[in-house]
Image (cartoon, rainbow, N blue to C red):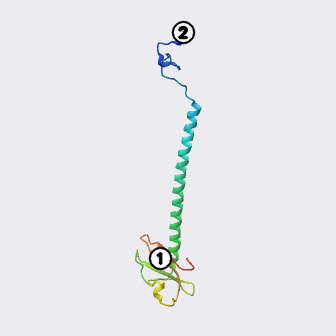
Amino acid sequence: MGEMTTPNPGTIAFPHTVGSALIKPEDKGKIKGRALSAMYDQTDMDMKQIYEQMQLLAEQAKTIQNRVTVSERIYQAKMSFDPIIGRTYHLYQKKDGTDTLSLIAPEEWGSRSPYEFIATVKLLADHTWKVLKEGERGL
């Protein structure tokens, strides 16, 4: 019985008296398994969030690129006025294939427009153009 006692009962891995607290060895594999599972759940959630942010950034980049493409076409069009930021204008294509930017909306031409309507656009502060409405053929 002497070997089942100790002067420092807190240093043994089993209860030293009948009324002692239950000491149960931990299953290290189970602890690591739960930790790994929680880690994978959290990192999967973080990766999904990053992926969604990347998709949003890709969409924003595509929108900007489209504005640049439209802006290049508009700046190559004939303009007989100086466009003002924040104002709305209308892009038309002449019969000879050249583009012209106009202050006149398609419905203001009356029964017959001399040009084919391409788009209604707005000049933004960065001097790119935002398409507000596209014609039947589009840009």
Residue furthest top as drawn: 2
- Quadrant location, the N terminus: top right
- 121 or 73: nearer the viewer: 121
The residue wearing badge 1 is 121
Q: Are marks 1 and 2 in contact (CB under 8 Å)?
A: no
Position in image of residue 109 (x %, y %): 47, 88
Mark 2 element type: loop
Sequence order check: which comes first, mark 1 or mark 2? 2
* 76 or 43: nearer the viewer: 43
Above or below residue 38? Residue 53 is below
**In the image, which disc is placed on residue 23?**
none
Q: Which residue is mark 2?
A: 1
Marks 1 and 2 sit apart, C-alpha to C-alpha, by 96 Å
Crowd band around label 2 with a 10 angstrom C-alpha radius: few (<14), some (14–19), many (20+): few
Quarter of the picture holding the C terminus:
bottom right
Q: Amino acid at mark 2?
A: Met
Query: Quick one: SS at disc 1?
Result: strand
Q: Nearer the viewer, residue 37 or 128?
A: 37
In x, y percent, where is residue 13? 53, 20
Question: How many C-alpha atoms fall within 10 Å of the one at disc 1: few (<14), some, or many (≥20)?
Answer: many
Q: What percent of the width, then of the height, locates residue 127?
A: 44, 72
Question: What's the residue at 42%, 79% (across, down)?
Answer: 83
Is 31 left or right of 81, judged from the image as shown? Answer: right
Q: Identify the amino acid type marked 1.
A: Val
